[in-house]
Amino acid sequence: MSNITLDLSNEERFETNTFTIDKNITFIFGKNGTGKTTLTNLLKDNATDYEVSVFQGFETVVSESNMLDAVILGKDNVEIDKKIAEKNAEIDKIQLDIAELETNVTKQPGKPNNLWARHQKKEVKFKKQKDKIEEFYKGSAAKIKNETDPQIAKTTYYKNDFETELKKAKFLSDIEIEQMKKTVNLTEKKASYLPVLSLNLGEYLKEMNELLCRKVSAQVVIEEFANNKDKETFAESGFKLHKANDKCSFCGNVLSKERYDKLKLYFSADEVESFRTELLEFISKIESELKKIKDIDIDVNSFYPEKSIEAENLRSNLLERKTELDSFLNELKETANNKQKYLYESLELLDISIPESMDLIIQKYNTLVTENNSNSLSEQKEIAKTKLRCHIIKTLLEEFGYEAEIVRKEELEKAVRESNNDLEGELKAIQLRKKEVSEKEDEIKELVRSTKNEKILADEINRKLKLYVNFELVHMQDKDEKGFYQIKCKRTGDIRNVDELSTGEKNIIAFLYFLEKLKEVKVGNSKPKLIIFDDPMNSNDDTMQYVIIEELQKLMRRVKKDDKFVLLTHNCHFYLNVKYGFDRDDGYNENTFMRLNSNGHKIKLKYIKTKKDDFKTSYEALWKDLELIYGCPMLSGGMLLNQIRRIIETFSKFNCMRSEKILSSVEGAKKMLDVNSHSIEALDAELSAQEKIDIIKMLQECFKGVNAEEHFKKHCKIEIV
């Protein structure tokens, strides 16, 4: 049986992205506005693998001319009827055979030793044995993981690791165990590699000397500090501290704008700033190299003893080389800082020796690290841990009696496999018999197609409505001999169109017409059926409600294995009655029961899994809706009051009391319900001013006032603190 899955990702009203129908019969209960028609239309448009029939009231079954078109159904015929009877008798015999076979392969309370039951018992025994071994694996893995003297397994050692090592399980002698523990407890040494710096010291010296040779041509000449570097430096510092027309902090005179602009031209010219920036960038680059050199160090303690002496020698050489490099780079840095004072003149070239690079020392050190870290100790430790684990595994296997338990599991697994083969053989036999039924049904359809009578539908509907209405459906033909149905008054004999009936009458006629139309033979259609009823109880009186319920239950009992039946309704009383018989304890596994709940913004698809989760009376449904409204932040306290009024009125009627009596025990309760539920006299009343929990507490006090607090606690599942 294939499933029908709808994509709801483009439907903003629903919380979920998919909706799946995987059972033959689906009951969906939802108030108006919760998306029932939307789901119906989506099923109608997307269930392309099914022959879809949808009932949504009178308008969905009439033609464009507001008529009920005649439906072609088979007519009893002596010759054909005899053949059909023979075929049906053959089908009945085969169905008996199928039923007998099915009692052997399905759960049967009266047959505790049939093939299905025996297979289940074998599966239970096999599962119990399998679980026993699985628990042994898990428990053993946990014991090994928690071993700390010494720790012999990784922290993520689980069941699968234990199973992998089963084949390596082996006992160790006491001496071997002690040797393995000593090996595991040895401290492992791991040294870190150093980066190779590849400093281009010659380029740095060349760049420094090029900067020393350069000078900036002054755009203006200021005679006061011409050729006097100290005065120039002093003037530049003062310029940075003042603005035009400031009083000089040194001499007390006013710095005129003309004088300020001249100084600005001297100290802030583009060429000056560009040269100064270049010097600063060079200094920053040297400082970065100095930091890299400073961070280079060797940790002798991270080496094994046989490598530590060589590591110490390399460290000594490295420190010496670091000192030389540090001195060289710091001299470049100081020279560059000094050059900032002499931007307007060339300086002598820097003549210093370029020290040797430390890269060779680092390369030797990194080779030593590789030798140190590739020491076989880690490998030996892992081998020792593995041997200790395998010793413990062997001990655990012996204690558990593992070999005998595995043999037992294999025997039970073989029994299940053989039993399953027997089941499959029976099921194949059932399928073959069902194929015979299908073939004979096809033969019956061919016989039915050889006859034609459009009056049978009218006769069948009239039979069902005979005691309930004062009219009957009659078959008519137009000038082209095309059949259709009209209404005939039983008292007057007047003929009128179907659309002239009342809404309720039209609905019941449409409903019964739809049911009969399902029987219509459609040549060449081999698709399974999807039958949908979208709120079939609209505008029907109580009498017709029971007719509809009875007809729907008959139809549901005839739903075939590959067909689907979906019923959507907002009518609580109708829902409770139409699902009767299908909502037994195991019915919630065999059929789908769903509730559509709206929070005012989104619609949630809630699956009802057990009978106790479904409401059993209309009154109980009122309490469940109260709980839903309370828990929805989108719905106001005013919505609670509407629901409370309905609960109190229902409770009062059943207990033969006036609703005023239960409300009188709480001051202001009646007025609150009047104003917020029905009355319009307080137009400026704030409906949400009362907290929801306070409204529920008020309801509790009302029930307490008439000695019905236990009734309240039984039905109200809202936690009150």
Image (cartoon, helix red, strand yellow):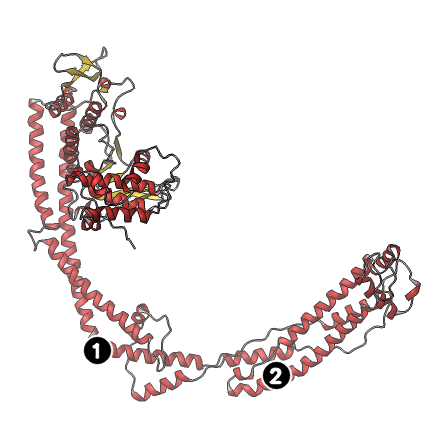
Q: Residue 690: percent from the left, percent from the top?
A: 35, 45
Q: Quadrant of residue 206?
A: bottom right
What's the residue type where badge 2 is placed? Arg
Q: Secondary structure at mark 1?
A: helix
Asked whether 387 or 127 is in front, the reply is 127
Q: Are marks 1 and 2 in contact (CB under 8 Å)?
A: no
Residue at 27%, 24% (x, y): give it: 59
Q: Quadrant of the N terminus?
A: top left
Q: Residue 398: percent from the left, percent from the top?
A: 22, 78
The residue to which callout 1 is attached is 399
Q: Residue 340: percent from the left, percent from the top?
A: 80, 67
Q: Quadrant of residue 404?
A: bottom left
Q: Secondary structure at mark 2?
A: helix
Q: CA distance from mark 1 to mark 2?
A: 56 Å
Residue at 38%, 79% (x, y): give it: 383
Residue projecting furthest to the top:
479
What's the residue type where badge 1 is placed? Glu
Asked whether 625 or 170 is in front, the reply is 625
Tell me if I can see residue 47 in this picture.
no
- Indicate whether 57 appears above or below 226: above
Asked whether 632 or 346 is in front, the reply is 632
Side (left or right) of 400 relative to 93: right
Residue at 29%, 79% (x, y): give it: 392
Side (left or right) of 132 relative to 100: right
Residue projecting furthest to the right:
223
Q: Which mark is residue 691?
A: none
The residue to which callout 2 is attached is 315
Q: Residue 216: percent from the left, percent from the top?
A: 85, 62
Q: Residues within 10 Å of mark 2 (few under 14, many from 20)?
A: many
Side (left or right) of 4 relative to 470: right
In the rendered structure, which disc, 1 or 2, sits on the residue that comes first in sequence? 2
- Indicate whether 246 appears above or below 403: above
